[in-house]
Amino acid sequence: MAVAAPSRPPILLVDDDAEICQFLATLLDLEGFEPRIATRPDDALGALPGAEAILIDLAMPEVDGFELCRRVRATGFSRPIIIVSARPGADLPAKAAAAGADEFVRKPFDNADLVARVRRHVRR
């Protein structure tokens, strides 16, 4: 009897910077996830079905990550949302939580730490 290969949880990456998206996609792919990329908020909303978690960059030109997080939650999406940002500000984690995010991660981040956070949220 054949054993099914373990599933690769789909993770949606939302960032307008294609290089950052590619870096994160490679990192998550190597760690056993199935990265999906959206560079625009509208594309992200269309890519929600099947996503096990979302990583959203805070700084985007059309709407910021907080607003996108609110829009994602308004669709009924209940999976984990992690907002990442290099923007300074002690109040940003609280703002992320108020927008519906499960976690806020500052850039630059430790790659292993980010992967562990994603893995922890996907397992729950």
Image (cartoon, rainbow, N blue to C red):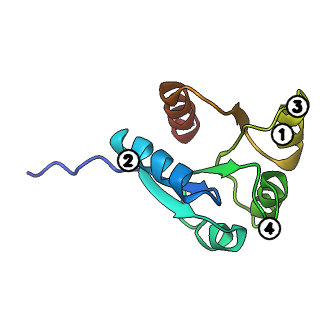
- Identify the residue under disc 1: 97
Q: Which mark is residue 62?
A: 4
Write the residue at 89% across / 40% down. 95
Which is more N-terminal, label 4 or label 1? 4
Q: Which mark is residue 89?
A: 3
- The reply to whether callout 3 and callout 2 are in contact (CB within 8 Å) is no
Give how far across and how far down residue 59 sits, in percent: 77, 51
**Nearer-the-camera pick, 53 or 124:** 53
Which image quadrant for residue 69? bottom right
**How far apart are the alpha carbons under marks 1 and 2?**
27 Å
Residue type at mark 1 is Ala
Which is more N-terminal, label 4 or label 3? 4
Residue type at mark 2 is Asp
**How far apart are the alpha carbons under marks 3 and 4?**
21 Å
- Identify the residue under disc 2: 29
Residue 52 visible, this orientation: no
The residue tagged with tag 1: helix, strand or loop? Answer: helix
